């Protein structure tokens, strides 16, 4: 791992602060694109005052997140919108459905808020910590809509998608709470939650469970049951 990659956790936090400032303040702004992602962000023409910078960074870090605990689990909160077509072209290659809704699972209630969250998520994708992370981020931004209700990610899918990424997520950010996989259903039923790690074929660095869920190869024979019937712990040698 090169020095640049090792520095990513610190750079990620610094970049978040800079992007927060850029989003909320600045004059003579210029429009840029996050390389390779096609996501616009604004860099200020001049650095804001320390007071306004602190206020705006705090506003960014205080972005609404899930859960305002009840609305994730209580139907009264989750049935607050109607299904609508997805809009993020970034997610076209990873989401197998076309219908979503706002508010999403991050708490965004309009496109302005959604674009703000994209700044944070785009930085995470640039780390390339996990090839399945994009699936999870897109499922949070544009969750599947079933009759006006959101379908949450499955806990196992969340764990698979965030493997090797947790160390890059600043623990102090409120928005980072969406990556706490314990908040999602511990279920394998497609009617209960979304598992995009279930696929007919897995990636090179993955092991396939009997239910077709792909898990990281390092989870095989590690003493932890990850596949149904502990299939990932079968036929292990030297354990």
Image (spheres, rainbow, N blue to C red):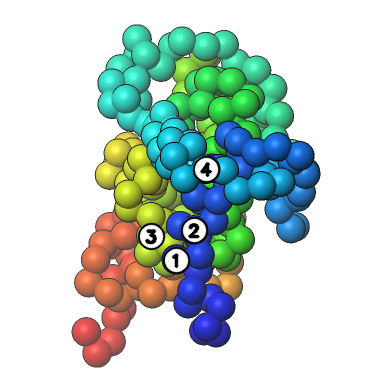
Q: Position of residue 68 (x, y in %)?
A: 32, 25
Spatial CA span between label 2 and label 1? 6 Å
Q: Position of residue 178 (x, y in %)?
A: 39, 41
Spatial CA span between label 1 and label 3? 13 Å
Q: Quadrant of the C terminus?
A: bottom left
- Is residue 195 in view from this perspective? no
Question: Which residue is disc 2 drawn over?
Answer: 14
Task: Give the number of the disc on residue 10.
Answer: 1
Spatial CA span between label 3 and label 4? 32 Å
Looking at the image, is mark 3 or mark 2 nearer the viewer?
2
- Residue 144, quarter of picture: top right
Of 92 and 227, nearer the camera is 92
Q: Is residue 98 above or below residue 140?
A: above
Labels 4 and 2: the sequence-earlier one: 2
Question: Which residue is disc 4 drawn over?
Answer: 49
Labels 4 and 1: the sequence-earlier one: 1
């Amino acid at each position: 791992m090169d020095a640049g990659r090792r520095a990513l956790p610190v750079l990620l936090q610094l970049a978040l602060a800079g992007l927060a400032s850029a989003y909320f303040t600045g004059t003579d702004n210029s429009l840029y694109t996050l390389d390779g992602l096609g996501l616009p962000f604004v860099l200020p023409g001049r650095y804001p005052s320390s007071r306004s910078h602190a206020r705006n960074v705090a506003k960014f870090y205080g972005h609404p997140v899930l859960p305002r605990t009840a609305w994730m689990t209580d139907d009264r909160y989750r049935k607050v919108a109607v299904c609508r077509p997805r809009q993020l072209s970034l997610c076209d290659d990873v989401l197998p459905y076309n219908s979503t809704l706002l508010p999403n699972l991050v708490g965004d209630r309009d496109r302005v808020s959604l674009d703000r969250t994209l700044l944070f998520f785009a930085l995470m994708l640039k780390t390339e910590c996990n090839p399945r992370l994009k699936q999870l981020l897109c499922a949070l931004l544009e969750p599947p809509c079933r009759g006006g209700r959101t379908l949450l990610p499955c806990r196992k899918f969340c764990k698979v998608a965030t493997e090797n990424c947790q160390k890059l997520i600043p623990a102090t950010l409120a928005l980072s709470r969406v990556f706490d996989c314990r908040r999602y259903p511990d279920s394998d039923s497609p009617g209960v939650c979304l598992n995009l790690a279930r696929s007919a074929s897995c990636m090179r660095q993955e092991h396939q469970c009997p239910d077709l869920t792909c898990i990281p190869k390092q989870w095989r024979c590690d003493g932890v049951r990850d596949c149904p019937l502990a299939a990932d712990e079968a036929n292990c040698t030297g354990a």
